[in-house]
Image (cartoon, rainbow, N blue to C red):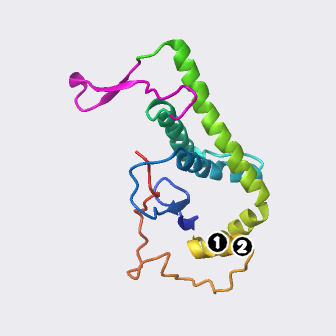
Amino acid sequence: PIHKVTIIPRGMALGLTQQLPTDDKHNYSRDYLDDQIAILLGGRIAEELTQDDITTGAGNDLDRATDLGRKMVCEWGMSKLGPLTFGKKEEQIFLGRDFSQQSDYSAETANRIDQEINGIVTRNYDRARETLENHRRELDHIAEELLIREVLDADQVMRIARGEQLVEPVLPNDSSQTPPDGHADHHEDEGNQIE
């Protein structure tokens, strides 16, 4: 579930959607991972739908989506290649604590792995794009409210998604944006990350 959405820059992020898990997870289903990839691609798709150009802003999201797709194929056996793992991780003593990926498969298999990863990411890109196209009005309304408020909490996002208007006033020194001591918190968790 969404915790909050903000356009206030935090570190390298120019804005973010923060999600908080409802419970501790150590085991992820394929559907859950597909949904995570679709969510990660949402920012780039929103940019494509609303702008004449695209930017580098989604770089980290694209990297994480591709990494998740690779893990689904190479580590978790969640592709048409079957219940196999590819690329053994080995700790090389002469490299200190760095890990290297050992290629234990042929060039043909590498090509099939790339096709599977591409298929997973592309399929979820298409799902996310269809969702945002079908809910373009809500997307635009959320963007308008973010320009006014800079931060939306989960309740506000859900109300906008239901087509409701936000009536609460915008406070210049909203306590949800700046701590009481007046210093903005520059450390922001980007949501739950899957290892």
Image position, residue 175 (x, y; %): 48, 81
Q: Residue at x 69, y 73 (%)?
A: 160
Of the pair 147 and 167, the residue shown nearer to us? 167
| Quadrant of image for the C terminus | top left
Residue 77, above or below 139: above
Q: Residue at x 72, y 73 (%)?
A: 162
Q: Three-letter amino acid code at disc 1? A: Met
Q: What's the magenta region?
A: 78-103
Magenta highlight on residue 86: yes
Where does label 1 land, which residue?
158
Q: Residue at x 58, y 64 (%)?
A: 7
Q: Three-letter amino acid code at disc 2? A: Arg
In the image, which disc is placed on residue 112?
none
Q: Quadrant of residue 139?
A: bottom right
Please report contact status of discs 2 and 1: CB closer than 8 Å, yes or no. yes
Image position, residue 18 (x, y; %): 51, 62
Instruction: Single out the residue that lies furthest toward the front.
Output: 83
Residue 37 in the figure: left or right of residue 184: right
Residue 91 in the figure: left or right of residue 166: left
Residue 63 in the figure: left or right of residue 100: right
Residue 126 in the figure: left or right of residue 104: right
What secondary structure is found at the residue carrying circle 2?
A: loop
- Disc 2 and disc 1: Cα gap in Å? 6 Å
Task: Decide if residue 50 is in sight here.
Answer: no
Badge 2 density bin: few <14, some 14–19, many ≥20, Cα 10 Å? few
Of the pair 113 and 63, the residue shown nearer to us? 113
Where does label 2 land, which residue?
162
Residue 89, above or below 58: above
Badge 1 density bin: few <14, some 14–19, many ≥20, Cα 10 Å? some
